[in-house]
Amino acid sequence: MNKSVEERIESFAKMMFKSRHLVMFTGAGISTESGLPDFRGPDGVWTRQDKGLPPPTTSKPWHLFEPNTGHYAIVNLQKAGKLKFLISQNVDNLHLKSGIKPELIAELHGNITKLKCPHCDMVYDTFWGFTECKCGSSLVPSTVGFGQSLPEHDLMLAFKHSRKSDLFVVIGSSLVVTPAADMPKEALQHGAKLVIINEGDTPFDRYAHIRFRERIGDILPAAVNRLMVLMGLG
C-alpha cells in the first residue's frame, strides 16, 4: 500500500534532517511553475523539436521570469546549512536569481545570462556589456548546445558531490540526458539514499527510496518547512 503524501513528506524531512551531505539535482520541471516550458513533457522544448516543431512560446523573455516556491525552498536549505551542493540542468538563471551562492551550484548546461571565454574559461554576466575577454578572445554564450561538451569544472564538481552525498534529491528531471543523468547512479553506488520529485517517469524510479509525482511546489516547500521544525528553526 502506498504511503500518503503527508507520510512521504514527513519521511523526506527526516531524511534531510539526518543527512550530512545533501545534494539536490534540478531539471526543467522545477521552473515550469514559474511559467517556463519543460523539455520532455507533451509540449516540451525537445518533444516539439523531435516533431519538427518550433520551441513553445513564452509569455515574456526568459530573463524576466522569476523563481518560484521550489527555488526558494532550496535557498532555505542553504540558509539552514543543510544544502551541500546543487546540480542543475537548467539554463534559466533562476537558482542564482533566487539567492543560491555561485560556489554551491554546478550549471551543467550553462546559463543564458552569462558569456564565457573559450580560451581561458572566464565567465562574464551579459549585462556587463563585454564582447571580448581580458585575455583577448571573443566571448561566446555559456549555454551548451547538442553535441557540445559540458563545462569541465562544473561536471567535475557535480560528480564529486554526487559521490560524497548521503542523500541525493532529484527535482523536475526525467533523468534521460547524460552525462547529467549519471549523477544519481554515482550517488547510489556510493551509498546515498535517493528521493525523486517528478511528475513523469524516470529510469531511476525503481531505486528511489521515496518517490513523489505531485507538483514540486506542493512537496518541496512543505518538506523543507517540516525540516525547519525538526531543526528547531520553524
Image (cartoon, grey):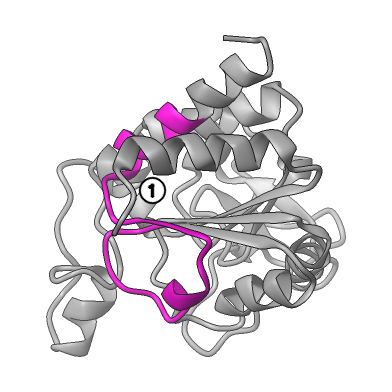
Which quarter shows the N terminus?
A: bottom left
Mark 1 packing: few (<14 Cα in 10 Å), some, or many (20+)?
A: many
Which quarter shows the C terminus?
A: top right
For residue 24, say whether it is visible: yes
Q: Secondary structure at mark 1?
A: helix
Question: Residue 13 lies in what quarter of the image?
Answer: top right
Q: Position of residue 230 (x, y in %)?
A: 63, 20
The foreground one among 78 and 126 is 78
Side (left or right) of 37 relative to 128 = left
Side (left or right) of 192 relative to 213 = right
Q: Which residue is mark 1?
A: 30
Q: Position of residue 54 (x, y in %)?
A: 15, 75
Q: Amino acid at mark 1?
A: Ile
| For residue 227, above or below residue 6 | above
Q: Position of residue 167 (x, y in %)?
A: 68, 53
The foreground one among 175 and 54 is 175
Q: Which residues are magenta?
A: 197-223
Q: Is residue 76 magenta?
A: no
